[in-house]
Amino acid sequence: MEKRLILDTDLLQITIHRLVEELIENHKDFQDTVLIGLQPRGVFLAKRIQIRLNERLKKELPLGLLDTTFYRDDFRRRETPLKANATKIPFIIEDKKVILIDDVLFTGRTVRAALDAMIAFGRPRLVELLTFIDRKYTRDLPIQPDYVGQRVNTIKTQRVLVEWTDQGAENDKIWLVTNEEK
């Protein structure tokens, strides 16, 4: 197995700050805008984005957590069942601008499932996608992010490993992992 560092702790923080500034540029005061982190791993990024936005705007922005497990098109095709996470959206998204946040955009299937799952909470006026890593050349569906931390050229046999201190890692880092073929 070969690991190549994509973002170290310092560059990761700079990237979060840049994404926050892009969001502020496009959403100004965030009137009628909500953040939704995709379970499980997008939640860590979503919380950091929310904290930074709250600091910059000096107000508390709504953050929801969305689980897409039962909306996935591969839910019944797996050998072992997927473990569901909690959905916590304490607000209605009807006529709101929604920013979906996930750590890695791979095939686009999780985002498609998230769009289906969101409908239970209302019909948003606008949905935008923020992803920390956009894995180019691996998309199965025509889904593209509006805000990107970094685009990475990958192939299907590679994976992106995101390490957060919130999950027990020593430092925040993002790696590209290539499994050696035998």
Image: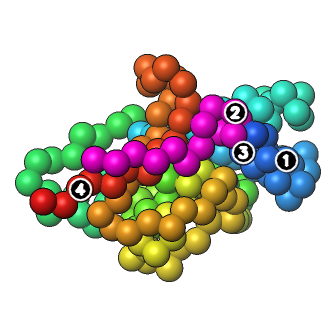
Q: In front: 135, or 86?
A: 135
Q: Amino acid at mark 4?
A: Glu
Q: Which residue is painted at 79% across and 47% down in the image?
A: 18
Q: Earlier in the sequence, mark 3 or mark 1?
A: 3
Q: Secondary structure at mark 2?
A: helix
Across and down, in percent, residue 62 comes to 69, 36
Q: In front: 165, or 89?
A: 165
Most extreme residue toward the left is 79
Q: In front: 33, or 148?
A: 148
Residue 3 belongs to magenta span = yes
Please name the residue that numbered disc 2 is placed on: 10
Is 61 left, or right, of 128 in this rendering? Answer: right
Mark 4 and mark 2: span between their CA atoms? 29 Å
- Closer to viewer: mark 3 or mark 2: 2
Please name the residue that numbered disc 3 is placed on: 15
Is 95 left, or right, of 22 in this rendering? Answer: left
Q: Is residue 66 above or below residue 158?
A: above
Please name the residue that numbered disc 4 is placed on: 180
Magenta part of the chain: 1-13
Q: Earlier in the sequence, mark 3 or mark 2?
A: 2
Q: Which residue is painted at 66% across and 53% down in the image?
A: 149
Please name the residue that numbered disc 1 is placed on: 21
- Closer to viewer: mark 4 or mark 1: 4
Mark 3 and mark 1: span between their CA atoms? 10 Å
Mark 2 packing: few (<14 Cα in 10 Å), some, or many (20+)? few
Mark 4 packing: few (<14 Cα in 10 Å), some, or many (20+)? few
Mark 1 packing: few (<14 Cα in 10 Å), some, or many (20+)? some
Q: Earlier in the sequence, mark 1 or mark 2?
A: 2
